Each structure stands twice: as structure tokens, then as C-alpha cells.
Amino acid sequence: MTIFRFALLRGIRSPLTLLFTYILPIVIILIRPMWIGEGLGLGAGGFTFLFMVTMLSAYLMSLSILTDKIDGTVLRILAAPIPMWRYLAENLLSCAVPLVVQMAIVSVLGHVLYDWSLTLSIAVFLCYTVLTLASVAMAFAWHCLFKGKEGNATGFSLVLFLGTFLSGLVFPTEVFPGLLQYVGTIFPAYWASRGLRDVLATGAMSGDYWLGIAAMLLFAVAFLLYGGKRRIV
Amino acid sequence: MNRFPLIFGHYFKRTICNPINLLIYLLLPMGLVTLNMLGNIGMFELMGGDLAAAGDAVAANATLLAAVFMVAFQFFSGELLMENIYDNFKEGPVRWRLLASPVPMRTFLAGAVVANWVFNLLQALLIFTVVGLLFDVRWGNPLMFASVILTVSILSQLIGALVSQVVPKRKAGTVTINVFCFGMMFLSGFLFIPLGDSAIATFITSYGTPLALAYRAILYAGPVLDDMGQALFNLSILGGITLVTAILVFIFGRRRTS
């Protein structure tokens, strides 16, 4: 797991990645007003902000794959006795694992500080973990679309901000007129917010929740297949 | 021979013809403002509200959102000038070619500054037109509104110029300006994180940042908050901040001769 270790350390060395992946999730869960009370979207805003941080962290962590493509590291990997699938798998794992650990900490803190039921804590952990996997896969597929960093970050921030609104993270999608309600279904975050909204409303992980989980897993597989099929060189 | 129009035209065309600039500085603010307003109106109706009866409240909310987004993206657009300065005047090979030309450096800088400023104003005009057509937004006194937008657009250019002079590298400059803009949004209470109801928090969200001063000046100048005296007070503070920033840009700009 040399590549995994190296990619993990590379992520920690970047100040932005360190902030968004390792510090911000813990800071957010400790801000009480974000989790107590009601807001327009999911609860008081904490869940929404955590969604955005998760997606942004996944993007930042997986940026190393694009960097390797630009500076020619991938060519050296191809010459090494490491299969490409292993290089990609360990890199993507290094993006996902820290976030999954953060979500576990967030779930435990939510249970301790805000009296989340065990069901809610497990549902939050599972939902955000699967969202992490889908976001990492989406970011990987996104990076495969670009030959350079120009436009990459800009385009992703556009997708992230507009997707946040269209996915029902700020307002429920029912409030949008006509077809705009359904545009958000192309984002994994839509399914995550749908599932979480169901758990928050009913207190149980019912059909809607598991539908959201299944949809996000399908998204993850689809993005990984797409990214894996494209030439990384 | 005056080369300024040629240089201005070059930088303006470069800004307009870059699809990334159009996406981030024109499409994104339009999208965010529209979705936010549709969401608020939809939520109001979903909770059983009567849009016709609550016309004034809905218009006030729409005006608030439009004002905040318009001003916020004016500040974000300062990054364009910062990038132009780094690319052409601080880093890369273009700088030496410009220095070798018979055209003074200040002419190039003036062209870049004015081109980006005009783009800023175009952005404001676009948001003003589209939200005015789609939603019931009450901008209030047109002279005050124009004064606020002009001041904010000049301030955003000065901030972009200042960051490019103080921060040595482009990447760090980009991070600085984004932290500054997002920081203003956070301190104004527009980033999902509530600051609370204490006296200090209320002061910060109302007067603590240029963003808060600007959008509240727009609201004070219209029927939403309806207090022209307060609007003028906010505008004068903004003017003072702009003047101080201009002086800083002048001081830091003269530190280097190349």
C-alpha cells in the first residue's frame, strides 16, 4: 500500500486539503446552532454544510491524480511494475478513507452532543460514507475530462454551487417549478439529501433512505467505470 | 500615440472571450440568485403562504437576496484583475516583453484595470436586468444604487490590485482573495453558519464588512429599510474604505520599479 500511504501524506501536506478534510468536519459538528433547530433545508444547516465540505474534500483529495497526469508521473507509473488499476485504487482509497473516518467521528459527536438516536447516527454515517465514495468517484471522472488544471476547478465549483441548490440541500426540490425539480437527480447529493431527509422526518431508515444509498452506489460505480475507461495519459 | 484604447480593447476582449470567466462571473451569479429566489418563493408557498397577500415581504426578501449576491460577486470579480496582473506583470515571460515595449507600464495597467472594471459593471447590469424582469425586486433610489455599485466595483478592483502587490505568488493570491470574499460572506451571516444575536454579532453582520455596508446601503435606499440617511452613512464609510485601499495600492505599487 505504498501508493496509498504516499497519496495520504501528499493530501495532508496540502493546506487546503488539510483544512477541508481533517479540520472543517470536526469544527462544523461542534458549532451547536448549526445542528439545533429548523432551517429551510436539512435541519439547521449543519447537514448541508457538511455535504458541501464532503464534496469539496473529495475533489481536493483526488486532484493529485490530475497533477500526476499533468507532470508526467503517470508515465513513470506505467513503466513501473504496478498495474494501473492498483495505482488508481490506492489513490482513490487515500481520498475516501480520511473522509470516512471524519464521518465516523461526526456521527459519534452528534450522538454525544446533540442526542442523536443510534438509528440517526448510523444513518448519517452510512449516508455520508456512501456520498464520500460517490463524490470521490465523481471527482475522479471529472479530472479525467481535463488535460490541465485550467477550467477544472472553476467548472467544478460551478457544478458544486448550482448542484447544492438543485439537489435539495438548501431547499426541498418540491419548491422549484416544473422540470427544475428533477434536474438535481443527476447529482449524488440529491439522493443523499433525499435519504437523510427521510430519516430526519421518520426517525427510521425506510425505503427512501435505502433508495438513496443504492442510487449513490450506482453513481459511484458509473463514475468509476467512466473514469477507468478513459485514457489517463 | 495613445495606446490605451487598444490595450483596453485587448484586455476586455480577453475577459469576455474566456468561457471560464463567463461561466463563473456571469452564469453562476445568475444561477444562484435565480435558484435562491425560486427556492424562497417556493418555500413560502409550500408552508401555506399567500404570495399575493404577502407581496411586500416577498419583494423585500427578493431585494435582499439580489443585493447580497450582486455585491458579493462584485468582490469575487476582483480576482480577474488580480490574475491579469500576475499573468502579465509579475510572473511569466509576458512581463519582460511588456517592459521592452515603448509603451509605459502604467498604460498597460490602466488598460487592464479599466477593462476588468467595465466587466464588473456589465455583471452588475446583467444581474440587475434579469432579476428585475423575473422577480419583484425593489432597488430603490437609482442614484444611490448606482453610487453603491460604482463604489463597490472600484473597491473590488483595488482589492485585487492590492493582493497582487502584497502576495508574491498567484496561487497564494487566489487563496487570499477567496478567503477574503468568503470571510465577508461568513461575517455577514450568509454562509449557513449563524453568528448569533449578541450585540457584537449584530454589529459585525450589519457594519463589519464592506459587503454588509454595501448591501445594506442598497436596502436602506429603497422601500425595504427606507432610511436614506443610513444609506448615505454606509456609502460614506464604503467611500472611506475605498480611499484607504487606493492609498495602500499606491504605496505598495511604488515599492518596485519593475
Image: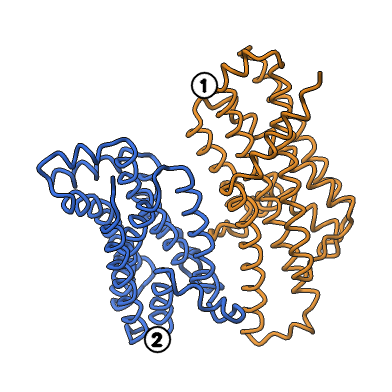
Question: How many neighbours does mark 1 have within 10 angstroms: few (below 14), some (14-19), or many (20 or more)?
Answer: few
Q: Toward the viewer: B233 or A66?
A: A66
Residue B180: x percent and y percent? 58, 41
Q: Identify the chain of the residue marked 1, using the numbered disc in the image.
A: B
**Residue at x 47%, y 43% (from the top left corner):** A150
**Residue at x 72%, y 68% (from the top left corner):** B61
For the residues labelled 1 and 2, the Cα–Cα distance comes to 62 Å
**Residue at x 60%, y 47% (from the top left corner):** B21
Q: Toward the viewer: B58 or A160?
A: A160
Residue A153: x percent and y percent? 46, 48
Q: Disc 2 designates what residue?
A: A202
Mark 1 element type: loop
Decide if residue A107 is in sight here: no
Colour-to-chain, blue:
A
Decide if residue A215 is in sight here: yes
Q: Disc 1 designates what residue?
A: B93
Please state if A76 lies on the left or on the right of A106 as rendered.
Answer: left
Please state if A160 lies on the left or on the right of B37 as rendered.
Answer: left
> Which quarter of the figure is the C terminus of chain A placed in?
top left
Residue A133: x percent and y percent? 29, 63
| Number of marks in the rendered image | 2
Q: Colour of chain B?
A: orange
Question: How many neighbours does mark 2 have within 10 angstroms: few (below 14), some (14-19), or many (20 or more)?
Answer: few
